Structures are given as C-alpha cells and as structure tokens.
Amino acid sequence: MQITLRPLYRKPSLHVPRHIRVIVTLLAIISPALAIGVGKNLPHEQDFILTAYYSPMPGQCCYVRGGYRADKILNGEGVRGADGTEVYPGMIAAPSTYAFGTVVTLPGIGRFTVHDRGGAINELPGGAHRLDLWVGYGEEGLARALAFGVRKVRGTVYDVGGFQPQERFSFETLPAVLDRLETFQVRGDDLLAMHMKAGDRGLSVELLQRSLNQLGFFSGSVTGLYGTETQESVRAFQEAYGMKESTEVLSQRTSAMIMAAVRRAGVTPPVVNNVEKGAKETAVRTAQRTLRFLGFYAGRTDGKYDDTLASAILHYQQKKGLVGTAEDPGAGRIGPLTRKQMTASWNRRMVVALADRLVTLHRVGLLLDERGKNVDQFLELGDSGDQVTLLQRLLSESGYFPEEKINGNFGEQTKASVIAYQKAQKIIVSASDAGAGTVGPQTLMSLRSDERREAYLLVRREGWSAL
C-alpha cells in the first residue's frame, strides 16, 4: 500500500495582478530619485549682509552721489531687474549663484524673490552672501534705503524647483526717515529744481510745506506728504496771486512764485507814512515812485502833493474798491488802508518780477546740465574722469587751480584748490574742518550756483545764443 505524505499546512499561493506589479516596480525605481530631488531643494539657512537700493528720479532734493546721473550709475536704471521684471516691493538683487525666482526669507523684514543682480552683490569671504533690497522710487525710496543701512541676518533660502512660500513684504516695515536726506541736500531752497506731484513724499515736500507756512497759507503739520491739505494750500496761494494752475503737479511757475514770495517776506514796504497835503517830501516822492511802478502815476517825482498825485491815488483807490467818489473819506490820500493795499500790490509785482528771474536762472541751469557744464556729483581725493576735469576747469576759471594742471585726476593739488575755494566761500574755516577738500553737498551747490550766475549774466548781455 502506497502512502502519500501531505504537509499539515500549506502556504496559499497569492496571485498579484500584472498591472500592480508594474506600478510597484516603477515606484521602486522612481522613489530614490524623488528622494534625491527633494533633498537637493530643501530650504537651507544662510548668513546675509543686507543693503537697500532705490530708483532715482529727476528733480530730487537729494542724491546719495550728488546727482541723478551718478545715482543711476550706482543704483542702475531702476526700472526693471536683471531678469526683466519691473521693480516692485519684494524684489531683491542676489549673487549670480542664486537662480532668478529663488525665494529668501529674512527674519523681521519679510520674504523676497530674486529678480536682480549687481556688481557688488556677490558671495563674500567668510561665508556671508550680499543681498540688495529694492525699496522704492525718488526721495522716499532714498530715505528708506539710507534708514535701512547695512544689516547682518541669517535667513532661509528656498531654491527654484523645491517648495517655495509666497512673498511677504511691505514698505510699512521699513520707514522712510526723511531727516536722513538732509545730509545729501544739493538743491537748497530751489523748488524749481524739485519736481513734486500729489502723493509724493520727501524732503522737497517738507520744504514746500515750510515755505507755504511762512507765507501764511499752510497751517498743518510738516509731514513731507503732498496730500490734500498741501494741495489746498497751494491752491490758496495761487488764488492770492491771481494764478490758475493745477495743483496735482507743482508747476514751474507756481514753484517760482512761492520761492520769490518767501525771499521777499519781511521786506520793508515802500510807503510807510501817510501821504496827504503837508506830508514830507521824502514820503511823497516814495508814493509817486510806487504809484508809477504800479501804473497809476505819470507825473514828476518832485515830492509835491498836488492834484495830479491826488488823482492818481484816487484812481488806485477806486480800482481796489477802497473808495467810490472823490468825496468819500480818505479819497485822494494815502492812509492806513490804502497804504496796506499799495504794499500788497507792490509786493505782488515784485514777486512776479523775481519769479521771472528765477525761471530764467533755472532755464540757464538746465542748459548747463544738458551741455555738461555743471559738476553733478560728489567728488573726493582719488576720483578721476570727466567730472573731475570739469571741477578743475571751474576752479581754474576762478583762479584756484592752474590751467596747465587740468588732468581729470583728483589729487593733492585739486584737494588744496577745493579747500581754498571752500574757505573763500565760507563753507569751511580751516583745512581740518569736516568736508574740507571734498566736493560735498554745500560745495557742489556753491559751484553750481556760481556757474549758473555767470551764465545768466552772459545771457543778459549777449542773449541765449551765447551759451
């Protein structure tokens, strides 16, 4: 009898469908590759040295290098990043080892995306990397960049291809400290050189607000913001001087009129005494000259109060609504009310005349800039180039630098000449004073003013073709 032995337990056979086996095989192949990729793009920490840059605009009160052209060279055109992205809050410039689109988180500041490069933006010895944050346009952007300064932080980098959080940054986290601009002020009180429009914020607007306050047209807080209150103050000034212009943009004419009014504020009026029969000859002559200037008197300046002068006074009074007829009290005589009105009329005319001169001076300055005849950047020992050549030429024309030594190199002789010029202009007292021998804001402003004044006199003598 044949006995067949069978196991008491037998493992059941498992039938795995073919498509499942294929999926498992693929996962076995792909999973290591995915693991490697994720590891490569994992966020990592990095030490950074941070600075900030801005987009310079024409007509600023201040430039960190002294002028629009020089600031553009330092900060770039300020329109688009190196990858073509239009500048915006949240853009940074990073070393070329950072792909465009890399996201970087900077604790306490925000989260940014790399869209730009820079000549000095690189990986530094010691392991830290340079980053440059874009912080705005014009004076507000410059004030924000100056306030930001240089910072060292440890941030987190999110490479392209891996997980990347969204940007998170607002200018509100980086205040624009307008006081920082005063060190770089190169325009003085020249509102004509500062282009302002509604919504702007900067030192230029502060200057405008202070000017309007001095003239009695602005009573708000000096904030540096060209807002509704400032616009209304500009409009009130325009109406007082018979002007009809937009307040959205501070026009050249309005700027010149405000500047002229400020410069004439506090000037002694021409007529300070009553003028009537029996008045002193000096008071009468002043009244005759003033009424002639205002277009109401054509007689002789003889100091005699006669019918011709009385008629001229009456005509002025009637024109201004001070009297109706010759029989009205005070008609034909200059008393307190007429004197006050005459002072306002005289001052308004003088302001207009000065504003015309300021506009012409401004035009002269623009022509000098266009033709490269103005120094438009700060200069110091060791600098070289066309701007130094121009500086040496201007100093030579004023007798401070030997013409045969003009070479475009800012050496010790140029420094000595700048010091001599600064002493003559009372910018410094001695060679040990701060800024001695360097062309900083005050020296630059003085040089430009001298050149503009000489050119203005030339235009007055020979016409615009002389430039």
Image (cartoon, rainbow, N blue to C red):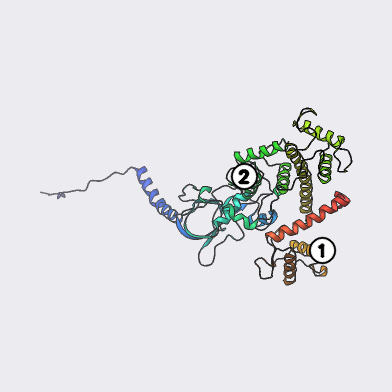
Of mark 1 and mark 2, the one earlier in the sequence is 2
Labelled pair 1, 2 in contact (Cβ < 8 Å): no
Q: Position of residue 269 (x, y in %)?
A: 75, 45
Element under label 2?
loop
Nearer to us in this view, 14 or 39: 39
Q: CA distance from mark 1 to mark 2?
A: 39 Å
Furthest residue in direction bottom, as rendered: 412
Q: Position of residue 92 (x, y in %)?
A: 55, 53
Asked if residue 375 is positioned above or below residue 224 in the image, the reply reads below
Examine the rendered structure and indicate whether residue 195 appears above or below residue 384: above
Q: Type of residue at label 2?
A: Asp
**What numbered label is drawn on residue 92?**
none
Q: Which residue is mark 2?
A: 200
> Which label is found at residue 397?
1
Q: Residues within 10 Å of mark 2 (few under 14, many from 20)?
A: some
Residue 388, relative to residue 182: is it above or below? below
Q: Residues within 10 Å of mark 1 (few under 14, many from 20)?
A: few
In depth, the one of 246 and 113 nearer the eye is 246
Displayed quadrant of residue 396: bottom right
Q: Residue furthest left?
A: 1
- Of 433 and 319, nearer the camera is 319
Secondary structure of the residue carrying tag 1 is helix
> Which residue is located at x 53 percent, y 67 percent?
125
Residue 320 spot, x, y in % from top left: 76, 32
Across and down, in percent, residue 190 comes to 71, 50
Amino acid, disc 1: Glu
Q: Is residue 391 visible?
A: yes
